[in-house]
Amino acid sequence: MAKQQLLLIGHGMVGQRYLESLVAQGGREHFDITVLCAEPLPAYDRVGLTSYFSGKTADDLSLVPEGFFEEHEITLKLNTKVDAIDRAAKTVTTNTGETLPYDKVVLATGSYPFVPPIPGNDRDNCFVYRTIDDLDAMIAASKTGKVGTVVGGGLLGLEAAKALHDLGLETHVVEFAPRLMAVQVDDFGGGLLKDKIQELGVTVHTSTGTQDIVDGEHCTHRMNFGDDKHLETDVIVFSAGIRPQDELGRACELAIGERGGIVVNNHCVTSDEDIYAIGEVALWEGRIFGLVAPGYQMAEVAAEHLMGKAEQQFAGADMSTKLKLMGVDVASIGDAHGNTPGCRSTVFMDQTAGIYKKAVISECGKKLLGAVLVGDAADYGNLLQLCLNEMDLPGDPSALVAPMSDGAPLLGADALPDTAQICSCNNVSKGDLCAAIDGGAQTVGDLKACTKASATCGGCSALVKQVLDSELEKRGVEVNNHICEHFTYSRQEIYHLVRVGQITTFDELLEKHGSGDGCDICKPTVANVLASCWNDWVLNKPHAGLQDTNDYFLGNMQRDGTYSIVPRVAGGEITPDKLIVLGEVAKQYDLYTKITGGQRVDLFGARVEQLPEIWKILVDAGFETGHAYGKSLRTVKSCVGSTWCRYGVKDSVGTAIQVEDRYKGLRSPHKIKMAVSGCTRECAEAQSKDVGVIATEKGWNLYVCGNGGMRPRHADLFASDLTDEQLIKTIDRFLMFYIKTADRLQRTSVWLENLEGGLDYLKDVILNDSLGMGDELEAQMQHVIETYQCEWKSTIEDPEAVKRFNHFINETAEADDNLAYVRERGQRRPAYEHERIELVEEA
Amino acid sequence: MNSAVTVEWKAICSVDDVLPGTGVGVRLPSGQAALFRTRDGNFYALDNMDPFSHANVLSRGLLGSLGDKRVVASPLYKQHFDLETGQCIEDDSVKLTVYPVRVQGDVIELATPA
């Protein structure tokens, strides 16, 4: 049977979700799919649009997995706007002059921003806030302007205000209604939100309508309000709500709602059974859903229906939201305004602390109907579950909003039914999480990877953790992170014991807090913690027996028992003379030589007894150990930057050397890699490192917790436009906090993914010093820096230590006689087993 | 017929040559051994060759205990070997030769088949 023609009109977040759902169900077997997208880019994360201002690129925001269209043989036509649908002929025509036949059409055209009919609204530098193009235009306009104004104080308007504020403009918000976020919060909540936002330097004008926009005296525009008031501004952004983009449906006479929107049934089918509508263009039971989660649900329902499955129906969606607006937590749940007949409210307000909480309770006093939270939305997850699952309140309703009331009726994750939706962005239920835990998931990171729970907005991550802990406990999985049988403590706790108890040796720790003799897990871990805290020479006698062989012999053991030698080449900058020394040493000892990914030189094949003499030559020539063997800072990679590069804006090499010299020798839970790029071309690949620094015209952008290797992770932008001093201070705190809190062998990427509160929490701790430990972290780092010593220099200067490098204790002049090598590409490498047998035969 | 195997005690080094909690390599006429000194001052000796990597590295392994067994961990692939019996904890089919050790005054001696 010939395949049917399916046209998807519009490729936004919901359209992409539709395609993913359809191909997952085998839709490609029945349909040839063509996507018509009016925008020049395929689907991107519109919810995350504001992050475009803080350094994310259009690529970062893209929602389309690489190779998606090719792999599924879907035709994507960008810059292609559909002009008309001919329902009789079953064709559509496009602005590119094409006429395409169809069997089925899916309309996912979304919405457009409503621009109030104010005279002058079409002047230059008047924008809407919807697409990446809009943002680029705003950024360009902000370069010449000083004042920016957003018309509309709703959710998106405040996002736009933040964007203008971040662009360095004096920012105003003009709202016609008497309060901000009129849909989600009440008068008190809106008032408090207004105060908090004004404190941040944004001026809010509520109950203010604009009559017209004309030429300004000091700025580009003058916005005239009633009562002779006016405001001068250079940039205007309209964000006064959305309207469904339903003109295609109107033109071909599909059923349309009175106030717009294409009418759909529970399967998202329009009045024409061959045409579906999903997302913000669709009108279901008289409502438009302007959030992404319901749009995703519609996408799933419509895709299933197309495949002949009718069980799933769209049944409306919860419009509860939680978000951070300019640093202020705001949440709205269910019937936030208390419109239900007979309902009552219980309210907590603390104007000094800037917190407002309201719970709307049913007439019977047993159910939570809705809530408003401003300034502190930590209870959002609990309250939302109480409301959505219509659960009986666990106690006195006032305890829902009262601060820190003892034994607050916090809802245990246990009490939730399996159907409770935990992650609304990705529609993950408690049952889904339980299934993943049954399948072996043991950490929040595991759950995120296999269910997508908390992978979009992250608002549910605390709840996901609660479910995980309670379910693991129920399954009898002992939730312990003890490092081994000798210490019933996690690495973090051991670090704490060592710090607080001023413990300086393994024996002392074992005696006070452990049992048995220790093992190959706890010994190196404790040695590492001791080094992080007190920074003793690792080969000092009490520490000697603790080190993994790599640390004991200060080299990486290779598969034949010999070692590699990696001197530090800070920032990858090396003089010809030093390079010659490396070459001469390699030649003298016939060492296999390779350039590493971290911009230095690795020399392989040194026997244990050769290590001290080789290092003596290197140390005498001015080299230091590169710590390639340790769980410690490896390299700080750099591009050549402004030193030579015609594009470089800052001295990336100089900064890389400064950073590498500062943190060299720092022992940490796992290895640490860093990089510094001299401009946004990012040739040093800093965004794949634990700490990445990228030069901007205004300073340094700092990225953290990236990783290459087995589980690549793109680093997160942590802070922008830092001065040299701020950069160092921030990295000091970040690294020390990681060392203090990470698990054994946990890279920064995994650490962050498992950190409760995630990136926002980390920023709070490091940038805003929310735990008040900034000075302490800096002082601890300073101690490590001041006590740095080159471990190889100390070792070759100590005859007792050098003695340990003999292969035999009784025949010190002899070498291991079991080594066999093969020459390959002009260098030697250890023989493989089969080659070894041949070698023996030849001999 | 099975007669008592005669052993030869061979002086290796002095007690102070081996730090508590570490090991050293020993050259034997027949090959290589790894000599260990545990935290409490006892001495043990096993083959130096790690049977999993065929490299002579066990003397550079970390010492410790698993339950009531004293063990050394291979520095390459981290298998554990019982110091008393030479048995590999992770693989029943692998067992190392154990060399008797004694301390004569300040001198450590290893027994090797004569």
Image (cartoon, rainbow, N blue to C red):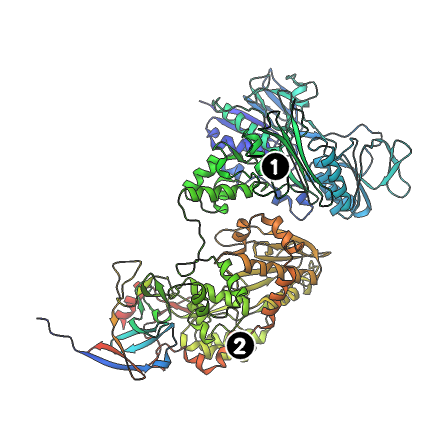
Q: In the image, residue A706 lies at what x, y percent? A: 56, 53
| CA distance separating discs 2 and 1 | 71 Å
Say what secondary structure mark 2 lies in: helix
Instruction: Note whether A465 is above or below B25 in the view shown.
Output: above
Q: Quadrant of residue A262?
A: top right
Furthest residue to the top? A88
- A529 relative to A779 in the view: left or right: left
> Is residue A556 visible from the viewing direction of this image?
no
Q: Residues within 10 Å of mark 2 (few under 14, many from 20)?
A: some
Amino acid found under the numbered disc labelled 1: Leu
Give coordinates of residue A574: x percent, y percent.
59, 71
Which quadrant: the C terminus of chain A?
bottom left
Report which quarter residue A352 is drawn in: top right
Please identify the quarter of the rendering in which residue A665 is found.
Answer: bottom right
Q: Which residue is mark 2?
A: A581
Front-most of residues A111 and A496: A496
Q: Is residue A20 above or below residue A690?
A: above
Looking at the picture, tell me which residue is in the foreground, A145 or A172.
A172
For the N terminus of chain A, which image quadrant?
top left
Across and down, in percent, residue A392 comes to: 54, 30
Dot 1: chain letter? A
Where does label 1 land, which residue? A400
Q: Are marks 2 and 1 on the same chain?
A: yes
Instruction: Tell me if residue A371 can be seen.
Output: yes
Helix, strand or loop at disc 1?
helix
Number of marks drawn: 2
> Taking A279 as reference, is B42 above or below it?
below
